[in-house]
Image: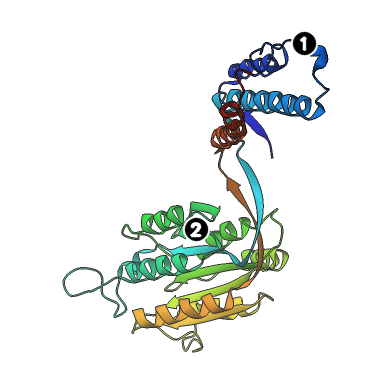
Amino acid sequence: MSFGFVSPWWLLLGAGALLPWLRPGQPAVDYSSLAMMPEDRLSVAIDRGLRALTSLALAALAAGIAGPYALEQWEERLGTGAHIVLLMDRSSSMNENFSGRYLGGTAGESKNAVARRLLADFVRRRGDDLFAMVAFSAAPRYVMPLTQDREAVLAAIDSVGDRGHGITNIAPGLAMALDFFNGRPATGARIILLVSDGATRIEEESQDMIRQWFQDSQSRLYWIYLRSTNSAPLDRPPTGASDDASPEYLLHRYFQSLGVPYTAYEATNPRAVEEAIADIGRLANQPLRYLEKVPRKDLSGWCYGCALILLLPLLAAKSLEVHAW
């Protein structure tokens, strides 16, 4: 642990710790013949001890006035949890509710609002996890780096509450989410938590690159598919001649080919979203090592406390002092 002082010049007062050794500790008492007094080694030892206590008390007071503190530092912590990147769809379709109607009139709570509310509850329950956040529509948006600051994560979730716009382009969002794990030690579970109501097809070149990044980072993928009543289930193959007839099905098949643990949850109502997030919470528990920033800590109270403890025996000795024979 490293230390510093707010006002180091006050340490010069520590030179006063030499004063008890430069002058007698008690006033002189007249005696008729010093030669008749026997040698008193106990009294000499007590005198030196009181001088030492006085010196230490003065040094502690000087240190306290100088304002000592422990420097801000990073400390390794061990917990149970995961590194979780929240990948949030912000396309215009997220403004709809689960019946497929846009907000307004009788539309009810949008899929975006449901997801944000339940993700916030999930974050509050996860004590040791580190969270990051990426939002995406046509392009990804960097929202929050990996952190254990719950208030910051909750604010990040709330910040994506504006109306979504544009199309769904998931490949750049996945790439940005995976980049959070680049260069970090592999401790705890690494999870990409995708919250989306659908996606376009990922190009072949991007598929190979993202697959390799998933395998290199040893990340897991959880997809909470916010399915509207008029959308096809993930396990239903396309019925039309075009491969684009069911992009969600194709995306699901691609995720199954990543070579990493992958689980999809089809949520057709807020209750299903809540159950999916609860299930992820049960699965995402592994031993987790992480670094936590410890803020600067004031140590002046310790110095004043030490000075007080050192002064108490001095006060007791003063009360027992003999002023005359």
- Residue placed most toward the observer, 99 or 55: 55
Residue at 59% across, 36% down: 309
Q: Position of residue 296 (x, y in %)?
A: 56, 38
Q: Which residue is mark 1?
A: 33
Residue at 17% across, 75% down: 106
Q: Position of residue 266 (x, y in %)?
A: 45, 83
Answer with left or right where residue 143 lies relative to residue 203.
left
Note whether 291 is above or below 84 in the view shown: above
**Callout 2 touching callout 1 (CB < 8 Å):** no
Q: Tag 1: residue type?
A: Ser
Note whether 96 is above or below 311 in the view shown: below
Q: Which residue is mark 2?
A: 133
Give neighbour class at mark 1: few <14, some 14-19, many 20+ (Cα, 10 Å): few
The image's mark for residue 307 is none
Q: Tag 2: residue type?
A: Met
Secondary-structure class at tag 2 = strand
Q: Position of residue 30 (x, y in %)?
A: 67, 10
- Residue placed most toward the observer, 2 or 272: 2
